[in-house]
Image (spheres, coloured by chain):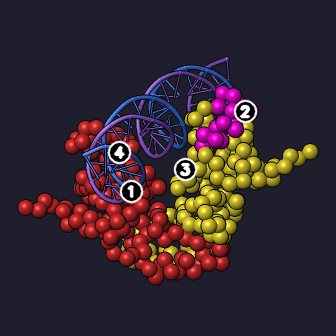
Chain colours: A red, B yellow, C purple, D blue
Amino acid sequence: MARIMDAPLDTAESWLAARGEKLTELRREVLSLLLANHGPIKAYDLLAALQKQRPGASPPTVYRTLDFLVAAGIVHRIDSLQSFVVCPTFHAPHQGVLLVCERCHGVEELDSPLWMETMRRELAGSGFAMNQHELEIKGLCRNCQVVTV
Amino acid sequence: MARIMDAPLDTAESWLAARGEKLTELRREVLSLLLANHGPIKAYDLLAALQKQRPGASPPTVYRTLDFLVAAGIVHRIDSLQSFVVCPTFHAPHQGVLLVCERCHGVEELDSPLWMETMRRELAGSGFAMNQHELEIKGLCRNCQVVTV
DNA sequence: AGCGTAATGTAATGTTATTACACCACCTTC
DNA sequence: GAAGGTGGTGTAATAACATTACATTACGCT
């Protein structure tokens, strides 16, 4: 019987296979923990979770695995939070912007090719070539705009 | 006789005075080092430089001063580089985007109110309120696009 | 002078990330 | 089936980045 969360793991497996890479047991465990977290997670928190099922895990264990998943486009690193989050649409062509809430630290991914194109055009004059895979916008999410604090 | 770099320091002083804050000797030294660096600098590199003229300087010395300068809008923190850079136009109203080169780690600031407005409008549908003071775009600068590596 | 607040000094510690090297599994090729 | 290469992981140590907590000093105010 299939466990919950298997579908994205299988998708990741095929996605990697198409690149000639493998979803090893370690990578599967890490990705599974990332998926279970629903939102950005810090490397050391992920390490703590991983150690429950894999006691020998150490910082290089998680950082190597995260680097791999990021390079494969399955996971995003959020610079402003020093955290990592699964890309909800890694398996499909997309041009996503990460909307990072500075208050609750939630992250949404907004897929907007039109928006990307607009930005690229606006930047053209400056001679700067935007990396559209690493775009992170800080601000307040809908919920957090309401809060007074 | 005025030393080189005095002008921006004096500008910072008035800018702060208008906010009821002061450019103390320590802040002046730190800002001066930041200006002398022409580009982003890491906190600990700044600390090392500061210690040459102020041997007792420690991490809190620089982090406190940087926090102050960032809060005053004089310095930007570049999340993707974990570095700090003087805002070239802190004294004037502006809506700058930081263009961070992923290869040479240089930073340009592009002032484009039109661009900001476009983005804000594009984001409106998502309910997300962009923080226009903290916008950082990664990519390749004009020079680095040419390099083959 | 005495008080209150802002600024800085100082020691320790917390958090994030990397290096370097050892070992093992798997695959190839002879 | 042994030799050698590659990719993946284990392990120890350390580097790099940042904060806490508390002591002390500087300065404006009455």
Q: Quadrant location of residue A2?
A: bottom left
Q: Give the farthest residue toward the right.
A: B1
Crowding at dot 2, Cα within 10 Å, few <14 / some 14-19 / many 20+, comes out as few
Residue B52 - label: 2
Residue contact at pointers 2 and 1, CB within 8 angstroms: no
Label annotation for residue A34: none
What separation in Å lies between label 3 and label 2 (alpha carbons)?
22 Å
Q: Nearer the viewer, residue B67 or B138?
A: B138
The kind of residue on which mark 2 rests is Lys
Q: Secondary structure at mark 3?
A: loop
Disc 1 on helix, strand or loop?
helix
Q: Amino acid at mark 1?
A: Phe
Q: Amino acid at mark 3?
A: Gln
What residue appears at the point 50 percent right and 75 percent down from the top-left corner?
Answer: B119
Q: Earlier in the sequence, mark 3 or mark 2?
A: 2
| Residue at left offset 34%, top offset 65% | A20
**Which of the chains bears the disc numbered 3?**
B
Front-lying residue, A35 or B56: A35
Residue, disc 1: A68
B135 shown above or below B47? below
| Magenta residue check for A113 | no
> Based on the displayed image, in which of its 4 quarters is residue B104 positioned?
bottom right
Residue receiving disc 3: B82
Q: Nearer the viewer, mark 3 or mark 4?
A: 4
The segment highlighted magenta reads B43-57
Q: How much space separates mark 2 and mark 1, taking CA atoms?
A: 41 Å
Residue labelled with disc 4: A61
Residue A7 coordinates in the image, percent (x, y): 20, 66
Same chain? Circles 1 and 3: no
